């Protein structure tokens, strides 16, 4: 191989490496506080599914949930309750038509109509913080004063740590209060951790995005013998 050809190959490889580094730098760049709400909105809009495991609660009262989400209106969450002589799993299953909540301690399944124009729409029934959380955080980013604190790993993913200060009485995430810190996934802007001035905590220890979820995950059948209560009837 002559020197001219070798030089051409070397230059080509250098250019390719430069382009790769430029793309990597652009992909991993940290947005500034002014642009963050718009970038977060675009990231969440593109997100299709979420599967993970998280802890959620206040102070030392925490529950661990397994979570499946197909945005925007499908969710399943399960939490195994401790201190019982049998396996007892609290279950929430939401889809476009219905929201089911199953309490194993009472053997009670509550169902709410979520179809368009349902009478129960706008009430506290038929929804959950686990469903509204990413959009509540986005609303907080849009309404609050932001300070970007840096990058940090959560659940094995790179996140942007952001402090949010909200006007008094105007927190979209009421459970967390008016001053909160959120850890946003750098690729999807989905919140992987939240800490609020109320003692509220949420943190994933495992998460994956945009992998197919079996549609049967979001269908619930009450266990035999369970009492079924329908909200609005």
Image (cartoon, rainbow, N blue to C red):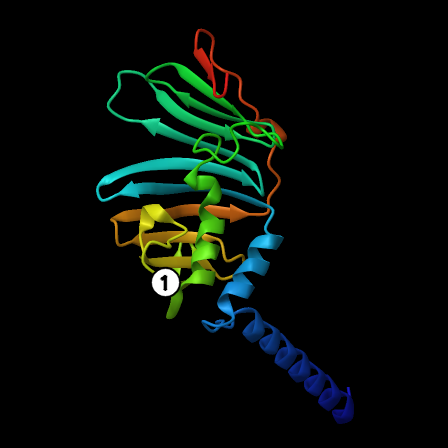
Whole-percent x, y for residue 222 in the image: 49, 15
> Hey, which quadrant is residue 108 in on the image?
top left
- Residue 163 vs 76, above or below: the answer is below
User: Is residue 155 among the parts visible in the rendering?
Assistant: no
Whole-percent x, y for residue 156 in the image: 42, 54
User: Is residue 231 among the parts visible in the rendering?
Assistant: yes
Position of 171 compared to 71: left or right?
Answer: left
Tell which residue pokes out farthest to the top in this image: 225
> Hey, which quadrant is residue 217 in on the image?
top right
Residue shown at 65% from the left, 78% from the top: 19
- Quadrant including the N terminus: bottom right
Position of 81 compared to 30: left or right?
Answer: left
Residue shown at 34% from the left, 15% from the top: 106
- Marks counted in the figure total 1
> Hey, which quadrant is residue 96 in on the image?
top right
- Residue 111 vs 185, above or below: the answer is above
Whole-percent x, y for residue 22 in the image: 60, 78
Foreground residue, 119 or 109?
A: 119
Dot 1 alpha-carbon crowd within 10 angstroms: few under 14, some 14 to 19, many 20 or more: many
Whole-percent x, y for residue 151 in the image: 40, 67
On the image, numbered disc 1 is attached to which residue? 164
């Amino acid at each position: 191989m002559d020197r001219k050809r070798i030089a051409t190959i070397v230059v080509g490889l250098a250019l390719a490496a430069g382009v790769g580094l430029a793309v990597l730098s652009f992909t991993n760049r940290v947005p500034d506080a002014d642009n963050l709400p718009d970038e977060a909105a675009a990231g969440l809009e593109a997100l299709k599914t979420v599967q993970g495991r998280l802890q959620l609660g206040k102070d030392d009262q925490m529950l661990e949930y397994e979570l499946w989400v197909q945005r925007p209106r499908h969710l399943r969450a399960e939490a195994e309750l401790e201190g019982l002589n049998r396996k007892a799993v609290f279950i929430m299953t939401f889809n476009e038509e219905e929201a089911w909540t199953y309490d194993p301690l009472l053997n009670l399944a509550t169902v709410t109509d979520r179809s368009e124009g349902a009478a129960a729409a706008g009430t506290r029934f038929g929804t959950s913080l686990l469903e509204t959380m990413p959009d509540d955080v986005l609303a907080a980013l849009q309404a609050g004063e932001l300070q970007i604190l840096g990058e940090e790993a959560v659940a094995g993913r790179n996140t942007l740590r952001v402090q949010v200060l909200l006007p008094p009485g105007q927190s979209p995430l009421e459970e967390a209060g008016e001053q909160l810190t959120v850890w946003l996934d750098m690729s999807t802007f989905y919140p992987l951790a939240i800490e609020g001035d109320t003692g509220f905590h949420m943190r994933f220890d495992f998460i994956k995005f945009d992998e197919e979820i079996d549609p049967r995950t979001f269908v619930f059948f009450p266990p035999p013998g369970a009492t079924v209560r329908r909200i609005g009837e």
